[in-house]
Amino acid sequence: MKKEQEELALQFQIFSQQLQNIMLQKQTLLIEQNDIQRALEEIENTTGKIYKAIGPIMVETSKKNIKEELEDKKEEITLRLKTIQAQEKNVKAKLQEMQKKFQQ
């Protein structure tokens, strides 16, 4: 019985760490999504030349091209966020289940 509790405690710790990692990934993606949204808004308000960084250099680009690139990246991040949110939900459910086992 004690060994089962130790294993359960270890699994609980592992899932807790997984949840922390998922939350960090989610936060990073949300920040990136926010940055992209601000960049898209700035592009809409820009009338001059637009440049993008490619490695250590800046290259002039069209408003249309950079907007398409940012929209694609935003869509990719949205899909990744949905995946991470599903993982978060699963891990939270497992943690709640384990908490119930601890209380028994």
Image (cartoon, rainbow, N blue to C red):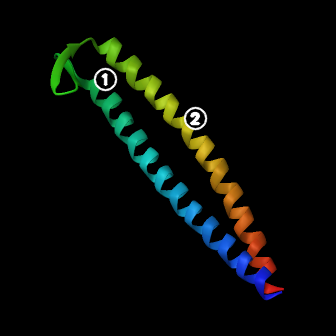
Q: Which residue is more in the foreground, 42 or 25?
A: 25
Residue at point 28%, 24% (across, down): 43
**Image location (x, y in percent) of residue 69:** 39, 20
Which is nearer the N-term, disc 2 or disc 1? 1
Q: Residue at x 73, y 76 (%)?
A: 8
Q: Position of residue 55 (x, y in %)?
A: 22, 26
Look at the picture and state if 100 lies above or below 30.
below
Tell me which residue sits at (31%, 23%) in the image.
44
As measured in the structure, the alpha-carbon distance from the residue carrying label 2 to the one carrying label 1 is: 24 Å
Q: Residue furthest bottom?
A: 2
Q: Are marks 2 and 1 in contact (CB under 8 Å)?
A: no
Q: Residue at x 54, y 36 (%)?
A: 78
Question: Which kind of residue does numbered mark 1 sit on?
Answer: Glu
Indicate the position of residue 92 as horizontal and vertical percent values: 68, 63
Disc ID at residue 79: 2
Which label was assigned to residue 33? none
Which quadrant: the C terminus?
Answer: bottom right
- Seen in the image, is 8 located left or right of residue 85? right
* Nearer to us in this view, 61 or 45: 61
Q: Extreme front residue here?
A: 3
Q: Quadrant of residue 57?
A: top left
Judge whether 17 appears above or below 79 on screen.
below
Disc 2 residue type (three-letter): Leu
SS for dot 1:
helix
Q: Is residue 71 above or below residue 27?
A: above
Which residue has dot 1 on it? 44
The answer to whether 60 appears left or right of 1 in the picture is: left
Q: Residues within 10 Å of mark 2 (few under 14, many from 20)?
A: few
User: Dot 1: few (<14), some (14–19), or many (≥20) neighbours within 10 Å?
Assistant: few
